[in-house]
Amino acid sequence: MTTESVSFTVNDSERTTEVTGSETLLDTLRERMGLRGTKEGCLEGECGACTVLLDDRPIDSCIYPTAACAGRAVRTVEGVGEVDAPSLLQQAMVRCGGVQCGFCTPGFVMSLTALLEREANPDREAIQNAISGNICRCTGYTQIVEAVEAVLVESGRANTAQGATS
Ligand code: FES
Ligand code: FES
């Protein structure tokens, strides 16, 4: 099987890897780079378990070719926080009950991290839109939305821009 060399950054580190022509970013991250925080769900771009950020925007890595990442910046859940140093969002998701079985969680964390980076004070509708491509079979979503709102309050953002948390 022919392979090609592709270089891009992963969590701010330069990486070069051999990939097959049709190889997905999900397979490259998990199987070649050992970054197994990104989960494998439907493999059809429907569930969002495999969400990572490409140049700060969420994508479904299960349907994204690694070759198209050349020269770009990929971020995975490993780049957001660590077990002993979770991000504010990760802490809030645990505290608010937004993590139950946890399988969907890395995908939600990536979609919501991107939202929190691009909007100072997203309202509830914006939060719900940001996770419209992420499926959770456990939480009912309310706790996840509440976790984001908790972050906005804790970080003083809920009062700094237009848009209200309800
Ligand atoms: S595993 Fe990629 S969207 Fe479901
Ligand atoms: S916490 Fe179980 S699927 Fe979301």
Image (cartoon, rainbow, N blue to C red):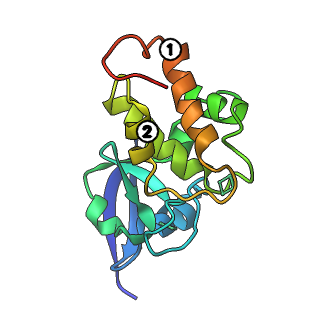
Q: Is mark 2 within 8 Å of ligand 2?
A: no
- Give how far across and how far down residue 37 sits, in percent: 60, 53
The reply, left or right, for residue 116 in relation to residue 94 is left
Q: Badge 2, how many Cα within 10 Å: few under 14, some, many 20+? A: many
Mark sitting on residue 39:
none
Q: Can residue 83 be seen in this view?
A: no
Which residue matches tag 2?
127
Q: Which of marks 1 and 2 is nearer the N terminus?
A: 2
Residue extending furthest toward the right: 101
The type of residue carrying mark 2 is Ile
The reply, left or right, for residue 67 in relation to residue 134 is left
Q: Do the residues labelled 1 and 2 touch (CB within 8 Å)?
A: no
- Front residue (pair 30, 120): 120
The N terminus appears in which quarter of the rendering?
Answer: bottom left
Q: Residue at 61% of width from left, 55% of height from top?
A: 104
Q: Which of marks 1 and 2 is in front?
A: 2
Q: Residue at 65% of width from left, 27% of height from top?
A: 85
Residue 123 in the image: above or below residue 135: above
Residue 13 occupies quadrant: top left
Residue 128 occupies quadrant: top left
Element type at mark 2: helix
Q: Residue at 33% of width from left, 42% of height from top?
A: 56
The type of residue carrying mark 1 is Ser
Q: Can residue 47 be seen in this view?
A: yes
Q: Residue at 49% of width from left, 47% of height from top?
A: 76
- Front residue (pair 117, 14): 117
- Give how far across and how far down residue 114 sits, in percent: 39, 39
Question: What separation in Å lies between label 1 and label 2 (alpha carbons)?
Answer: 16 Å
Mark sitting on residue 155:
1
Element type at mark 1: loop
Q: Does the residue labelled 1 lie within 8 Å of ligand 2?
A: no
